[in-house]
Image: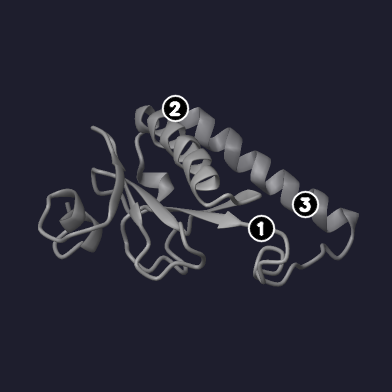
């Protein structure tokens, strides 16, 4: 646990959160300033800053709960769909991994992915970046 982490304070009961679900691995609570009503956050109970810090054995449980909470929010809010967002460092308001579960409906005012999209200059640039990513995947797999 990091000193002064707001989400760790929710986990250990030092601060109050509007909890909707908890188990041995995760905690889910209402976002205090929701994009839409029903907007929830799912966090691992243990402090990890980003998805890259989460141990592999926790990933299945974390995302199983994200899936379950997504269905619960969709049903509770009678929404057409769910937007799942996870910032890692950039735009991460609290430095404790958290996954946003946001109910969505057509015409709700959110535009696309909420940020500008950028095309690749050409097929060559696409392939160069594809190869860079594949190379790093190979490098990471060699470490494991």
Mark 3 or mark 1: name the one nearer the start of the chain: 1
Mark 3 or mark 2: name the one nearer the start of the chain: 3
Distance Cα–Cα, label 3 vs label 2: 25 Å
On the image, numbered disc 2 is attached to which residue? 144
Pick whichever, 128 or 57, lies toward us: 57
Q: Are marks 3 and 2 in contact (CB under 8 Å)?
A: no
Asked where in the image residue 133 lies, by quadrant, the reply is top right
Report the side of 119 relative to 111 (left or right).
Answer: right
On the image, numbered disc 3 is attached to which residue? 128
Distance Cα–Cα, label 1 vs label 2: 41 Å
Name the image quarter holding the C terminus.
top left
Pick whichever, 16 or 54, lies toward us: 16
Q: Label 2: how many residues lie within 10 Å, few (<14), some (14-19) or many (20+)?
A: few
Asked where in the image residue 139 lies, by quadrant, the reply is top right
* Residue drawn at (36%, 52%) of the image: 97
In terms of secondary structure, where does tag 3 sit?
helix
């Amino acid at each position: 646990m990091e000193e002064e982490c707001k989400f760790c304070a929710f986990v250990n009961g030092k601060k109050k959160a509007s909890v909707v679900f908890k188990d041995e691995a995760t905690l889910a609570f209402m976002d205090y300033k929701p994009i839409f009503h029903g907007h929830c956050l799912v966090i691992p109970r243990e402090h990890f800053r980003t998805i890259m810090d989460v141990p592999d054995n926790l990933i299945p449980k974390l995302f199983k709960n994200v899936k379950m909470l997504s269905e619960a929010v969709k049903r509770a809010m009678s929404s057409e769909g769910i937007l799942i967002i996870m910032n890692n460092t950039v735009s991460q308001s609290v430095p404790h991994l958290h996954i946003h579960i946001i109910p969505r409906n057509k015409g709700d005012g959110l535009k696309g992915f909420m940020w500008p999209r950028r095309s690749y200059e050409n097929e060559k640039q696409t392939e160069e970046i594809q190869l860079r990513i594949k190379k790093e995947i190979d490098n990471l797999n060699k470490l494991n």
